[in-house]
Every structure is written in structure tokens, then in C-alpha cells.
Amino acid sequence: ETGVTQSPTHLIKTRGQQVTLRCSSQSGHNTVSWYQQALGQGPQFIFQYYREEENGRGNFPPRFSGLQFPNYSSELNVNALELDDSALYLCASSFQPDTQYFGPGTRLTVL
Amino acid sequence: SQELEQSPQSLIVQEGKNLTINCTSSKTLYGLYWYKQKYGEGLIFLMMLQKGGEEKSHEKITAKLDEKKQQSSLHITASQPSHAGIYLCGADMNTGFQKLVFGTGTRLLVSP
């Protein structure tokens, strides 16, 4: 158990829709990172939030956005969903710059 | 091209056998993390290596980071069915924030 939770577990959306994924970090962790993992691939870094501000971003378009809240929770929002957005979305929390602990993931399917 | 290469991509070993998984980078690694993942689930942290030549062990799993800090190996001794899963190496490429770059993973099956 990492103490990191994510909701929902699974989600099915259609192209063009918007989705919000949620993550609850370990208590005391000031950093949350989001990753996208396509089938058969390693996780790809989307972005990181440190003390409620975006701290770094990977090669993802602006329709991927996030928020981090003072209560150790965070959100990943994806607008205008595309078929290629189908993946496992993982959040990881850490006390910067220590080890990242991952949640169980949200499986998003876009039809 | 992949910044981190893992080999082999998949591995089937008989229970009780030893095995090694490799992770190679073309750049200097500032922190190398090993995680294990069950299919479709989250990543479980195994070990973190930072110094060249460093070696860490936990139960039957040993990880090493070579002196030049460009390659790491994960060795499992006397494998058990519980070791089955996907092993991922993740590296901190010194981007100024802790962005992890991952390899594509090694899928391990342990046959009874």
C-alpha cells in the first residue's frame, strides 16, 4: 500500500468529451506527478505539480491540464478526448525530491 | 528513440532459477528507480540507486548501478511465482524537476 489513491478505477468516454481524473496523495507529500501509460509501454510523464503550481511538463498538448489542492488531492483534466488518449493514467506523489509513490491508476477508454 | 532501453523485453524462467534484467541509458543517470507492476495496476517501488557502483538488496532482489552511471541491472535469486510481473526502470535525467523517464519494461513469468 502506497497511500496514494485514484478514482475512478475505470472510465469509458467518447471522442470529443472531457474527463477529470482524481488522485489523493500521501499525507505530507508536496509534489504530484501524472503519467500516461499506453498498453505495452512504460509510463510517459505528463506534468508535475509542486505546492499547487505546475513545476514541469512533458510532451503533451495543452488540452491536458491539472490542478493540485492544499488537501493533498489533485486532478488531471483532458479536453476534446481522442482515441489515442485511451491508456492507464497514473499519479505519483512524493516529498520533493524523494521517491515517487504511485497510485493504482485509472483505466480510460475512449470510443 | 527510447532514452532508456530494457532487456530482455520478456522472460520466462522456471521457479527457483536466477535471472537478470538490464536497463541502459545513453545519458548519465542522476537517479535510477526500479518499480514492479502487475498487469493494469500501479507501480510498486522496489529500489532507488544514485551513486556509481551502488548496490542495494531487498529480500531476493539486488539492483546495481554501474560506475559510469549509465547502466543498471536487477537480479532476482531463486525466483518465485510472486516475482512475476512487469519490471520497469525509471530515471531522473536531471531536468531540474523530478521527471522520471521509463523504459518499456520487462515482462517476467515464473513457471512452477
Image: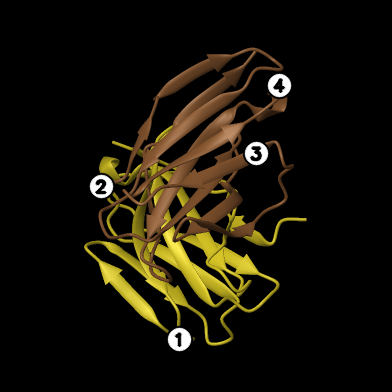
Chain colours: A brown, B yellow
**The disc numbered 2 marks a residue on which chain?**
A
Question: For the residue marked with disc 2, what is the amino acid?
Answer: Gly
Secondary structure type for disc 3: strand
Q: Which mark is residue B53?
A: 1
Counting residues from the start of the chain, the first of labels 4 and 3 encountered is 3
B14 left or right, relative to A3: right
- Nearer to us: label 1 or label 4: 4
Q: CA distance from mark 3 to mark 1?
A: 39 Å
Residue underneath mark 2: A3
Residue underneath mark 4: A83
Secondary structure type for disc 1: loop
Question: For the residue marked with disc 1, what is the amino acid?
Answer: Gly
Same chain assignment for discs 3 and 2: yes
Residue B18 percent coordinates (x, y): 36, 58
Q: Quadrant of the N terminus of chain B?
A: bottom right
Residue B33 at least partly seen: yes
Q: CA distance from mark 1 to mark 4?
A: 44 Å
Crowding around mark 4 (Cα neighbors within 10 Å: few <14, some 14 to 19, many 20+) is few
Secondary structure type for disc 4: helix
Q: CA distance from mark 2 to mark 1?
A: 32 Å
Q: Are marks 4 and 2 in contact (CB under 8 Å)?
A: no
Counting residues from the start of the chain, the first of labels 3 and 2 encountered is 2
